[in-house]
Amino acid sequence: VTSLTDQWLRTEFQDHARTIDPPADLHQESMRRARATRKRRKGLQAGLTVGLAAAVTGVIVIVAGALSPSSAPAPAGPAPATWTFDLYFVDMAGINNTQQPTLVSEPVTVPNTGDKPLDIVNALMGSVAEGKGTNGFNFSSEGQYPIAKVNSVTVDPDVIVVDLDRNVWDPYPAANCLCPSGDMVMQQLVWTLNSALDRTLPVLLTINGEPARGIWFHRLNGPVSMEPGVSGYPTNASGQTYGDLPTSDEPLSNKDIPDLVGVMGNNGEHGYITKRAFLGGRAPANPEQALEIQATAEPVTVPVYAADGVTVIDTFTIGSGER
Amino acid sequence: MTSNEAEFSAFVADRSAALYRTAYYLTGGDRHAAQDLVQDALGDAYARWGSIRDASAREAFVRRIMVRTATRRWNRRQRTREVLTAQPPDCLQPGHEEATATSVDLAQALGLLSARQRAVIVLRYYDDLNETQIAEALGCSTGAVKTHATRAIKALNATIGGTTYAPTARALEDS
């Protein structure tokens, strides 16, 4: 078989499915587990009801208000005292033993200030790299977290807008620093919000009302959805592929990087830097070497080209890896 | 037994085997993970069974839970399985070289795809869903479904075309 056809795949699935025998106790075990799940959730609901009753007395509201970093007013109607949802991080645990980064989630419970979207993003911004996950929104040498504060989170029918008070990724660190995988950092926000709110909406990141220019070489021209951002790159007259690096919950492969990588230049021009510049031209052979490069490298300014790969329209400064 | 429970039990009796096979492919051929996946999805669905008024939508509802759960779990599993080289690898999935060096069957070949690519292939060619239905199950656009399908077919071509892959029909005839 050298070229798969629709009919071949359908036939192959039909044939192969005949070889799969479901467990004999599938029906019985499914019913048992379903009843257990429902019973557990009813117990949880009962617990929440008790909590809500306490909230009516004002006790829970006062505690939540005291614990909350936000000055948002307490909800007028009955509401849970806390939210529990998944925060998404970039797992860099494998960087020292040659594994690829992965998007992972950790459950978190935070006080309910009455603005769930804001509580969600505040929780993400306030989380520091702990355990297996690294937070691309709090990756800094400053050691002060959160780096950026959340101005607002607005959930519209078609998009979620997150406004921060500071560009977390300006100046840009070097491509070869041990920073979280840039393609996944924006997806931390997208997956966290959509998972917690049970939506599938794209997320627009803004800095004090202005669209964010990008996250570590990943130019943001608009809202970012959960799906991969690109299905192929156009080619210019010189045969070079060009385009924005996609954001994704899966690691980029070398093939996913175009010859010219989209960035927003120092003067705000949308253009492209070369793949070589993007890769830093000096990929470390091991984590120790990466740390050495990170500590000693000076910022480098490279040209930003138009899509033709020839016309210089701006410059782009690749930092030292330190903020 | 309430009417809801009776309806649910009948649904499980009727559809659990088919859902298990879908789960088997979604988990890349892991029988234990498939059983967990289908049972967890049925448990979630049962908790909201009464609110699904359209009986014909129930299977799609369970399938959607399965697909999204499988994707999340697979991505978590990859944390301990994937391998980073000094330069980014040319293939997205780890173990590709090892797997292509030996004989693989359909489930193993699917296991080399990303979670979403695999889900698209399974829903399209096993569950026979159209692109709109697949997009609904995955929570993405039809354009993304096409992208995943194209990449998945390309990867399957590379795996199946370059190995000692034996079509299942031949195995069935041999048995």
Image (spheres, coloured by chain):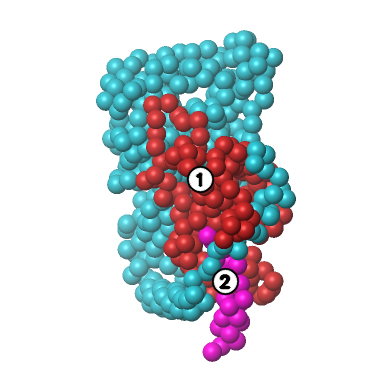
Q: In this structure image, what is the colour of chain A?
A: cyan
Instruction: Verify whether residue B61 appears in magenta.
Output: no
Q: Where is residue B165? Give x, y as percent.
A: 56, 45
Is there one chain holding both mark 1 and mark 2? yes
- The image quarter containing residue A296 is top left
**Could you tell me which residue is drawn at 64 percent across and 65 percent down?**
B60
> Tag 2 or tag 1, which sits nearer the N-term?
2
Q: Say the numbered circle drawn on residue B103.
A: 1
Q: In this structure image, what is the colour of chain B?
A: red
Q: Amino acid at mark 1?
A: Ser
Most extreme residue toward the front, as rendered?
B174
Q: Amino acid at mark 2?
A: Ser
Q: Where is residue A241? Give x, y as percent.
A: 62, 22
Q: In what quadrant of the picture does the N terminus of chain B appear?
A: bottom right
Asked whether residue B126 appears in the rendered view, the answer is yes
User: In front: A227, or A202?
Assistant: A227
Residue picked out by circle 2: B16
**Could you tell me which residue is drawn at 54 percent across and 28 percent down?**
A255
Q: Where is residue B135? Give x, y as percent.
A: 65, 52
- The image quarter containing residue A74 is bottom left
User: In front: A141, or A236?
Assistant: A236
Q: Which region is colored magenta?
A: B1-24
Asked whether residue B133 appears in the rendered view, the answer is no
